[in-house]
Image (tube, rainbow, N blue to C red):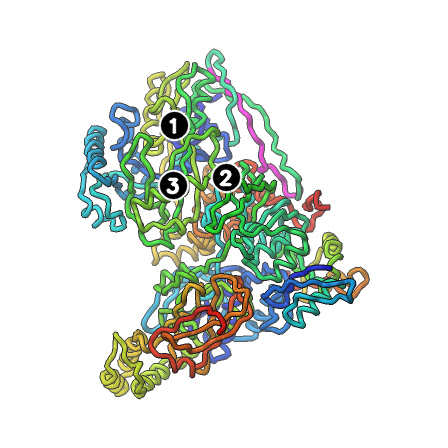
Amino acid sequence: MKEYVCIICPRGCHLAVDEENDYAVTGNGCLRGAAYGREEAMHPTRIVTSSVRVRSRIHPRCPVKTDKAIAKSDIMKAMLLLDDVELSPPVRRGDVVIASLFGGEANFIATRDIDE
Amino acid sequence: MHDEYELIVIGGGPAGLGAALSAREHGLERILVVERDVQLGGILNQCIHNGFGLHYFGEELTGPEYAARLIDRLNGQAIDVLCDAMVLEIIPGENGHTLRLMSADCGYRTVGSQAIILAMGCRERTRGAIQIPGTRAAGIFTAGTAQRYVNIEGYMVGRRIIILGSGDIGLIMARRMVLEGATVVACVEIMPYPGGLTRNIVQCLQDFDIPLYLSHTITRIEGKQRVEKVIVQEVDDRFHPIDGTDIAFDVDTVLLSVGLIPENELSRAAGVEIDSKTSGPIVYENGETSVPGIFACGNVLHVHDLVDFVTTESEGAGKAAAEYVLRRIDVLEKRIYEKVSHDDVNLQSPSYDDPQKVACEAEHARASHDDVERSALIDDLSKKLVQGRSYCLSIVRDETISYTVPQRIRVQRVDKQVSVFFRVKNPQKMPKCIVFRDGERIVASFRRPYMMPGEMERVTLTREQLDDVCGNELLISVEEIR
Amino acid sequence: MFDVAIIGAGVVGCAVAYELSQYKLRAALIEKENDVAMGASRANTAIIHGGYDPATHTLMGRLNVEGMRRCFELCEELDVEHKKTGSWVVAFDATQRTTLEMLLEQGVANGCEGLKILEGDIVRSREPNLSDDIVAALWIPESGVLNPWEFTLAMAEVAVRNGVTFMPNTKVCGLTWRQDHYEIKSHTIRSALNMSEDSSFQQEYHRETDIIAIRAHYVINAAGVGSDLIHNMVAPPAFEIVPTRGEYFLLDGTAVDHLVGSVVFPCPTRAGKGVTVSPTVHGDFLIGPNSEVVADREDTAVTGGALRDIAQKAHRVVPSLNVRTSIRNFAGVRANSTYGDFFIEKSATNFIDLAAIKSPGLTCAPAIARVAREMLQKDGLLKEKRDDWRGGRRIIRFKEIPEEERDAFVRENPLYGRVICRCETITEGEIIASMKREIPPVSIDGIKRRTGTGMGRCQGGFCGPRVMEILARESGRDPLSIEEDGCGSTILIGRTKDPRSREVSSE
């Protein structure tokens, strides 16, 4: 049995997910909560955001994010990859900073423009 | 830059951008946005995490992305922008307001404007405001200052960190610091419930096994030059530390996330009436403050949890400011006309209570051939009417509600409906009703499955409901469901 | 070889340096911290005392009125923020009223002018927020408030301009008389100042401590809370410092109604002058101090109990006062002593103690400096005045520029058009100007003391990072080396995206 606090809405239902029993969810106040609980128990994922070095006079760092959620267990590994990145202006929102994280579909992309 | 504007928006963050765009859309042609930073976007620039925009843009964005969408829209419009500039003073006037503003590029300028929108945002409460005992060591930051250092400037503010307060910025920074390689030993909250959104408690603390100590606070900070240690104690229900509950944490950094305060020194100096509960201006249904032609929106008005609501609110203020400027005379005339032709019992106003006299004065005003005189007469009359209690409903609250925005509703000004934002004082875990009453009678009632002080609530009152109200006060409270 | 070495760059040491700089001699001003005014001179009630309080036979009683008048003159000459507000001592009952009469008599004996006792209603007509329980008050017109750290700094700046050598980060650890001079052994700290741009990260700053010997014919001990330790290096113990901590609240002047227009004291007791409510030169309000003997001479921590106590006492005098408008709490350690008075003596060959200077030491400092000068003159020093002495000081504060001149001034000096500290309206021009004066600031608080940045409601939350950027840029330093205040109070510990910034234990 795994326990979670539902984040779908501010109510914060305490969910219990039974892995032994086909990830059945109890404690949920609505169907969306059940789906959230199941997802969290089976393969939790997160969007990761950070900022990376950029050779700019004005902006020492450029914010980035993963364009898709990645496995929760990969977050710290993904962060370490950013240590080696240094962008050069111009940077455009959406520019891929690191492609295909861990061979998957998610990329780190820039989230702002940096012109100079 | 011109010497005269129809509208000057003070602040180029999400509130100011939203307001300027909306005012432009509603027909204003001379708009100036004044921003003190070197770039537009305000605090969103440093909020590099995701979670913005779900309500307004229908997709999840980071702070810089949310800001960029507004800035892109603004760039396509004929709106003047002055960055790296400060408004130093607002001098309200009967026929338009005057601002003193300054920047390194444009010097010290005096600029006139028909309307003003206050969108200066808020600041963080500091250690001095909450009086944490201990030394004055370095390493104590408000969470937002730390956020700027880390996210924008690329500096680490500490290695071992404790967070005081469970406001959203503190929670967000807990995760940021861990991701950047620091250790966050705990998050300490004096209230028995968290201050931030549940989503942030889960994704910023629980995801990284950061313990949350509710009903605890920091009672001492030690360290001569840099923070070395803090003492945390449990508090009783009157927030007094309980002896013998000390926990010592070896940390080099304390981040404070103990509340935000709207930045209203400029507004206050301009004579704008301030609500001691929100620390923001008291506003009418359209965001207009007690000074005619000065509007407020965003965190300068009351602290929001979600930028999406800021944008919506700001669009309302922008629209209202445009209406104020474009239809100033029309509206006044119409209002007076409505007023005099309206045979309702509410017409008794202590400051101006004789309908015959109103009618007579209105007639006199309209008959005047001199434009200036005419407008002055109408202004004068309208002001008297606005002051009249019957013309304006005050929203009052009992002890279950900590504040509402707006605080006042001029019913005749409400087109179809008006949104009322509020926060409950205590967590309401069971389904409850939000009830509006005039005296004993229920005017409107809204069911909510749960409510938390950390989450702003919104309900909508219709013009019909408002028209039904007897008296000048509308009482809002949380009640059991019957 | 110096002619005179002054130990301690607090208000007394700097007043002496200012005085001596007018004569032809080589003087050194030795300070263990990285700036002037780092002890009690920066954490006190910021009052120019009228002089009615100290007993007439004491040095304090003899020097106060002279010092007070000189303080006002110096503030004018050196462009130090000050205000002649006048002050009140309030009485709550007949016994306290008797004390007022005693104080009036004592004040007259000490040389005060214009003192009078007024009835409660008249007092309240001038200070409407004072308690209805106040039956009478002593009015002291010749008194006021000043910016104490700027006062100290201003005197030091003029001294340095006229040839006095300022030696910060230099802690005296030994004094030996060598026939015709003292050898002053000191630890000097080569602090983070020397960090170069390329050392982008360091786990700990290298702070090298060297021992150096400074030689001087004459030594003046102005070491404040450490003055007994210096004394004991050359003479048998004669007094002992009893470090006494006082805590304060600073209340936001923009958030509260005008509390008081002048300084308000309760009736003094044996414990001291009590909790004062006073306006500050910056438009805020200061309440405090309490009085607590502490073991550590540098223990400037604030405590919950003391703050509650202060709030309660201040509340009695001004009932409408609300400490929730507090923007800062701080504490200072005063150099109270077993001697009970200022200890001003020639205690050894060519060695003068200006020691145990407690309240009203700030006010008395110029008079103490005058006494020290005369003692040196008696010993045959200071024979010749400098004919090239340059006194005076002018500071451009944006806020003080008249409305009609601002535009022209900003066009001429665009940096004065960029507001860095928005709470206090302090511009980049003011910050940079402060860095070009005789004693440049080395820390964020150094700039704060010189310009007022970060003094306001946000306490540097907004302007701190920008002040750091300007300080680093203008002095060619790495931001990582910039300290909040004293040596070692580093703000940033590294850069992001640098593996060395990651906490080892989190692996």
| Residue found at x 78% / y 67% | A22
- Compared across the picture, whether B443 is left or right of B383 comes to right
Q: Is residue B408 above or below residue C92?
A: below
Chain for disc number 3 = C
Q: CA distance from mark 1 to mark 3?
A: 21 Å
Q: In the depicted view, which residue is nearer to us: B293 or C192?
A: B293
Q: In the depicted view, which residue is nearer to us: A80 or B101?
A: A80
Q: Position of residue C396 (x, y in %)?
A: 40, 48
In the picture, the disc for residue B135 is 2
| Residue found at x 37% / y 48% | C282
Q: Is residue C71 above or below residue B167?
A: above
Q: Which residue is mark 1?
A: C336
Q: In the depicted view, which residue is nearer to us: C195 or B57?
A: B57
- Compared across the picture, whether A38 is left or right of C122 comes to right
Type of the residue with mark 2: Thr
Question: Badges 2 and 1: C-beta atoms under 8 Å apart?
Answer: no
- Compared across the picture, whether C370 is left or right of C429 comes to left
Mark 2: secondary structure: loop
Residue range highlighted in magenta: C181-198
Q: Which residue is mark 3?
A: C309
Q: Is residue B419 above or below residue C103?
A: below
Determine which quarter of the picture holds residue A6: bottom right
